[in-house]
Structure formats: structure tokens, C-alpha cells
Image (cartoon, rainbow, N blue to C red):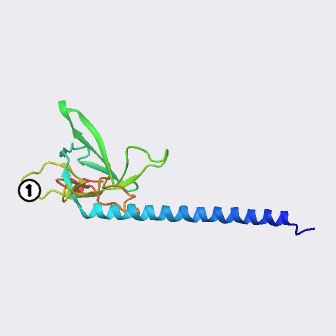
Amino acid sequence: MYNTPLRQRQRLRDWAISIAIVAALVAGVFLWLNHIKEQDAQKRAAMANTKVVYVADPVQKLVKHADGSYYAEDPNTGTYEYKTVEDHDVVVPKSVSVKEQREQPQFLWHHLTFTNDIEVRIIDPHEADRTPRLERLRCTVKPIDPSKPRYTGDPHDTNFSGRQQLCQDQITILVPDGSIQP
């Protein structure tokens, strides 16, 4: 009574459905992994035809603070606050940071951040230009051969090759005397 042909057919059909579902999942994972592998190969080919170049931003001349300093550093956040003189002699407070956020948020709330290389350098007394200033070299990419595929993403992107940036902006704060800085 327990092994009736109707129950055996039902059990066989259930097994067949289970096997089909597992096979479909395995095939889906296999196709997805092949797609990821193909995208990786395309990225490597694009990177082989790409070189990192640095483009200079306009130099920002620093305004001397009342205490004689040109910038204020917050070591906890890696932020450097400074002031510049813009058009019509307007003093504008600005800042640069070791970590910067991308302007557009990703995935609703998650902001991508990238790292800058910031250096404070004392201007040599014998240098021709002794103007206190901030110089920024922006990291960008350029194709070696324009006719071939190249990397077109943001070189600051931390998603590149497993959370590693392709390059960093190089920021130099040049001041005449470092002894009075915070």
C-alpha cells in the first residue's frame, strides 16, 4: 500500500525537478564566472594600452594667516585647511585631504573614496619662485596606441584590481618657513 506506482511516479518527478533546478543553478554560476573571466581579460588588454600621466591644475597662491602660518593641518583627518586669493581680491577658504570622496554617491548611500599623496615642502631660500602656493598634479590615463582598446575608467577608482587605486593625485603645499606651522 505504501509503494503504490502513483507515489513512486510522484517521487521520481520530484527528484527530476530537483535535479533540473540544481543543474540550472550550476549552469548559471558557470556562465557568470565565464563572463567575469572575459571581462577581466578585456580589462587587462585595455590596461596594457594605457599609461598614467599627470596634468597640472592651476597653481593656488596661499594667503598668510594672522598667526604667520599658511595652512592648518588636522592630523586626525589628514585635512589641510588654507586660504587663497581669487578674482577681485576675494579670500576663499579651501582644503585638501588625504582621503577624498567621489562627488556622486554609489549604491544610494555608499560613497567611494580615493587617496591623495600630500606633501608639505619648505621653499628653498635660493629658489627663484618663493611664493607660498599649492600645486596639484591630477592623475589621469592616456592610451599608448589610440587605435586599440584602453582603460576608460577613473584612475582614482578603488574598485580597480581589488580595491587598489591605479594612481594618486600628487599635492604639494610649498611654504617659505615650516617652523611656524601647526
Q: 134 or 116: which is nearer to us?
A: 116
Please, which residue is most extreme toward the right here?
A: 1
Residue 128 visible, this orientation: yes
Q: Residues within 10 Å of mark 1 (few under 14, many from 20)?
A: few
The quadrant in which the C terminus is found is bottom left
Q: Is residue 142 left or right of residue 31?
A: left
Q: Is residue 76 left or right of residue 56?
A: right
Residue marked by disc 1: 127
Occupied quadrant, residue 165 = bottom left
In the rendered view, would you say 6 is above or below 153?
Answer: below
Please, which residue is most extreme toward the top here?
A: 88
> Which residue is found at the position 63% from the left and 65% from the top?
22
Percent x, y of residue 116 = 31, 56
The quadrant in which the N terminus is found is bottom right
Q: Is residue 166 left or right of residue 64?
A: right
In the rendered view, would you say 8 is above or below 85?
Answer: below
> Which residue is found at the position 85% from the left and 66% from the top?
5
Percent x, y of residue 173 = 22, 53
Please, which residue is most extreme toward the bottom here?
A: 3
In the rendered view, would you say 88 is above or below 73?
Answer: above
Query: Secondary structure under badge 1?
Result: loop
Q: How many marks?
A: 1
Q: 151 or 21: which is nearer to us?
A: 21
Q: 147 or 152: which is nearer to us?
A: 147
Q: Is residue 169 left or right of residue 114?
A: left
Residue 174 visible, this orientation: no
Occupied quadrant, residue 58 = top left
- Which amino acid lies under the numbered mark 1 shown in the image of this protein? Glu
